[in-house]
Image: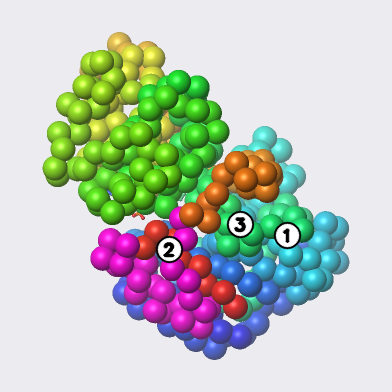
Amino acid sequence: MKALTYQGPGKKGWVEKEKPGIQKPTDVIVKITKTTICGTDLHILKGDVPAVTEGRTLGHEGVGVVEEVGSAVRNFKKGDAVLISCITSCGSCPNCKRQLYSHCSDGGWILGHLIDGTQAEYVRIPHGDNSLYPIPEGADEEALVMLSDILPTGFEIGVLAGQVKPGDSIAIVGAGPVGMAVLLTAQFYSPGRIIMIDTDEARLEMARQFGATDTLTVGKDDVIASVMDMTDGLGVDVAIEAVGVPATFDTCQKIVSAGGNIANVGVHGTAVDLHIEELWIKNINISMGLVNTNTTPMLMKTLQSGKVKPEQLITHRFKLGEIEQAYEVFGNASREKAMKVILTQ
Ligand SMILES: NC(=O)c1ccc[n+]([C@@H]2O[C@H](COP(=O)([O-])OP(=O)(O)OC[C@H]3O[C@@H](n4cnc5c(N)ncnc54)[C@H](O)[C@@H]3O)[C@@H](O)[C@H]2O)c1
Ligand SMILES: [Zn+2]
Ligand SMILES: [Zn+2]
């Protein structure tokens, strides 16, 4: 079979690789029908994630059809259409028992990281019973690919951890796929004002189409002063960080109101200055974490009922065999006006 593999910093290849087989009775082999590329894959390719070794197949998102099941798999059989979660979980270890799937003792984020991922013709999913979800009849498979990672991430780590409530003023710093997923899922709770902040004007235009009430351009607008103006000098109830750099976390600590929440979604590679000397008196909460994907069944229902339309985030479509071209487009997202790409086999 063919797979997109990491071949050291800056190098990748669409290469011939052995088709995965069952290794443990709980494994499921899935034939990929649709997959996508995540910003995390770009980080891996730069060499930012040293745990990824040469030859590793990338990708942790996708939908497919069950090709083969291990002897202990009870929920799936050959031919079933499935959604692959970016988080693999056994469902029975102490962390899984409290739905902290991202910290499963035999799983977590391993796909396209510690084991071969979804940017291939076939993938082996460990603990298939708990790490795959059946696709409802007639569901939009492209929309479902957004449920492997970005929608649960934005919803769990941004909206739920940030405790977005009806009428709240919220700010989302970062209008990439994850910030957009926060924007889409925050609207379940009818916030009064949604201020989207980014450097990229095209992404902010997209954010306005998807429900942002206000947008601010970093480098052009005075972001802090504008947010304060918009909120009668109080700041926002919820400030959500969806970039992963010190400057954007700093923005969040400057615009959060007393009694508010800072929800950090971004993955950070360097330390940030926490201004506890200003924040201690403000009765705020700060949250952060890795997505658990425990809300995936709920998000599937909202997708089925048309309450959320994540397919809006798809800007480009390719055949799986054109994945190197897709990386070229996604890697130059601003120039190409790309948000999410879909690869179909
Ligand atoms: N916590 C989790 O479980 C989890 C899961 C998936 C992704 N993430 C992280 O979420 C973050 C966002 O992911 P993404 O795929 O949307 O990333 P992305 O790189 O596609 O988007 C980031 C956005 O931030 C904007 N930006 C860059 N610098 C900025 C600045 N100084 N001020 C304002 N905006 C700025 C960019 O223009 C871009 O639109 C990343 O750090 C990613 O690693 C976290
Ligand atoms: Zn991802
Ligand atoms: Zn577990």
Q: Which residue is mark 1?
A: 138
> Regarding mark 2 in the picture, which secondary structure is present there?
strand
Q: Per the image, is 167 magenta?
A: no
Instruction: Please tell me the numbered disc located at residue 315.
Output: 2
Residue projecting furthest to the front: 209
Q: Residue at x 63, y 72 (%)?
A: 33
User: Which stretch is magenta?
Assistant: 313-337
Question: Which quarter of the picture shows residue 19?
Answer: bottom right
Number of the label disc, if any, that sits on residue 144: 3
Q: Position of residue 151 (x, y in %)?
A: 53, 47
Determine if residue 161 is in view. Answer: no
| Residue 303 screen position, x and y as percent | 63, 47
**For marks 2 and 1 on the same chain, the one whose residue lies earlier in the sequence:** 1
Neighbor class of circle 3 (other Cα within 10 Å; few <14, some 14-19, many 20+) is many
The residue at label 1 has a CB less than 8 Å from ligand 2? no
Name the foreground residue: 175 vs 60: 175
**SS of the residue under disc 1:** loop
Residue 344 vertical position relative to residue 110 in the rendered view, above or below: below
Residue type (three-letter) at the residue carrying disc 3: Leu
Mark 3 vs mark 2: give the one in front.
2
